[in-house]
Structures are given as structure tokens and as C-alpha cells.
Amino acid sequence: MTIKYCANCVMPNTKPNSIFLNGVCKACLYSINKKETKINWHQREIEFNQLTSNIKKNNKSEFDVLVPVSGGKDSLAQIHHVIKRNLKVLAFHVDNGLKTDIGNYNLNLIPKMGAHLMTFKPDTNIQRKLVKIGFLKYGDPDLMNHCLLHALPIRTAIKLRIPMVFLGENAALEYNGDAKIDSKKVSLKWFQEYAANKKFTAKFISRKYKIPYSKMKIYDLPLNSEIKNTKAYFASYFFKWNSENNLKIAKKYGFKSLSKNSEGTYKNYVSIDEKFNRIHQYLKFLKFGYGRATDHACEDIRNKKINRERAIKLVKKYDRKKVSSYYYLDFIKLINISKKNFFLTLKKFTNHKIQSQIRFIK
Ligand SMILES: [Zn+2]
């Protein structure tokens, strides 16, 4: 396959699910719509105010809204939007076992903001098995983590009769421009395409690797019929989604960034909560030829913070940085594999055809 880059940003066409129109990626086209007055953000905020005041009026359960949180800047911004409207908030965090100190620090700001925080730690044996399968068989340690992060908060909200789940951005729209995927609420289709990576659902993994489904149910989205009274909304539908804005909001509550850039990119406030993401991002680079720096450079181009020429320099400098022991030592310990096996797996998933072309990015 020959890599082609978006004419506006630096996203390659090797990105899974990406759509290009006349040489421009759909995420760029969506961002142009976002900027030009095609979306009435004021109207969207009014819609959010109405939605939340209806919930406040009619809700009989202990919490009005459940917010899934990682403890990153976006989480704090999401909490900000709901506490500002006096909702009874339950922040819900899944601790996958590799949290960083700064990640814990930022997460613990949430109760101080005026929300309750619940942390869920999955069974280490199951978690180890699933991460191992994701990493060794599919080159993605986060394969089932993504499912858990999306499914369990919704399941919990249903069980606790919480009428609203407030998610962050709709990745389908923000990063792929796929407007066909419902932009306001989470649908089953969205979950299958963007959280469960199409066929990699809990049912599929349970069958294929003979792990009892009863133990994996929390990784699966509930049935449509169960979802009836709980609706999951994307914050990015109501508020213009922008990393810098969210960072500004988070900082008001004491959010800490790293003193230097996060490994694999040029920003110091992203991917700092836990260590899985770095390995996931590095594998993404080996497989598809673009890493975290590309994601950030694309967002910065779309927000007119940098030009394409500068973006190319940043991508060349940061995307290719090898994953360091700070990340992989804890990871291999968690899933109990050798360092040799770790690096062999990275090699196994490297797409050499793509890797031989990326240096010609222009
Ligand atoms: Zn683009």
C-alpha cells in the first residue's frame, strides 16, 4: 500500500476507518464545519442546559449523571460542565493497573471539584489474560480495555438508575469525520466500530479464547432494551471539543502536567494518566505509520496553531521515539512476559512496507 497524507493535516490514509475526500481527510472537513458557523454552539449549550435541568427536575435516584473519567484534562472539563449545572455527579474510573503518580494526583482532584468518585479495579487474572491476548495476538494491549472503559460505566449507570452518562469526545466525528455514526448519543453501532474495534467484542474473545462470558460481561455493552432509561451523551456534541480549552478548564482545578513532553509526542499534558496508552500508541505507529505526535499535530493544524511544515518536523522528531523502559517494564511485569517476548511482539506487528515509506512524508 502506498501512503498518502491528507493535504491539509498530516494524517496518513493508513489510519483505520479513515475517509478521504479529494485528498483531504474527513476529520479536517468536519473541523472546518465546526469553525465556520455551520454548528450553532450557543444553541447546543442551550440544549445541554435544557437536558440537564430536565434531569434535575425528574430524577429520583442518588445521582443525576455518571461521568467516566481517566483523570486527564478532558475528564476534569467534563466534570466541570456538569457540576456547574448543579447536577449530582458520580465520576467513574477504571484503574487498569498501570496508573502513574501524576495520573493519581489529577484523578484525586475530582472529589475536590464537588463530584463523588468511584474507582473500579478489574480482576487481575482476567485483566492479565485479556491484555496478553490483545498484545500478543493483535498487537494492541488496550484491545479489551477500550471495551471495558466504554461498557462498564454505562452498565453501572443502568444498575444505579442514573439517567445520563456524559462521555468525552465522539472519536468517530472528531478524528474520522464519520457523521453517519450518531453524533450526540452512543449507539450500539458506535460502540462496535469505535470501542470494540468491530469484531473484537467480549463475546468474540470469550468464544475464541475460552474465557467464560460470565466473567467478561462487564466488557460488553448492555442490550439496547436495558439502555432504555439511561442515555449516554458525548460532551463534544454540546461543547466545541478542543484540547487546549479543556486544559485551561482543568488547570483551574489544579491539574498538573509533566515538566517535559510526554514520550512520543511534543505535548506535556496528554497520555500521562497511565502506561498502557504509550505502548498502544507505539504499536499504532509500527502498524500504521503514525503515532501520538501525528494526532496532536493534526489537531493543532486544524486549530490553526501550527502550519503543515512545522507539523511534519514534529512528526518526524517525536512519532518515531522508541518506547522506553519506564513504560514497558511495568507492562511486562503485569502480564508476565519476558523483555525478549515484548520486543519480538513489537517486531511481529511492524509493517515494514509502511515503515519504509514514512520518512518521505511531505
Ligand atoms: Zn486532514
Image: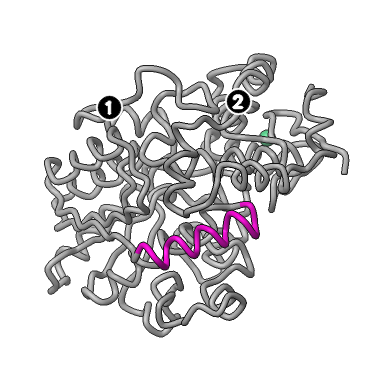
Q: Nearer the viewer, residue 7 or 277?
A: 277
Amino acid type at circle 1 is Lys
User: Is residue 161 toward the left or the right of residue 146 in the image?
Assistant: left
Task: Tell me if residue 56 can be seen.
Answer: yes
Q: Which residue is mark 2?
A: 321
Residue beneath the point at 87% across and 39% down: 2
Residue beneath the point at 22% across and 75% down: 161
For ligand 1, give the image quadrant: top right
Residue 153: give x, y in percent of width and height: 33, 64
User: Is residue 58 toward the left or the right of residue 192 in the image?
Assistant: left
Please report the bounds of the magenta region as a residue range.
124-139
Other-residue count near label 2 (Cα within 10 Å), few / some / many at <14 / 14–19 / ≥20: some
Amino acid type at circle 2 is Lys
Residue beneath the point at 25% across and 40% down: 104
Residue 344: give x, y in percent of width and height: 67, 45
Please tell me whether residue 55 is drawn above or below residue 45 in the rendered image.
Answer: below
Determine the image quadrant of residue 112: top left
Please tell me whether residue 141 is drawn above or below residue 283 in the rendered image.
Answer: below
- Disc with the residue nearer the chain's start (2 vs 1): 1
Quadrant location of the N terminus? top right
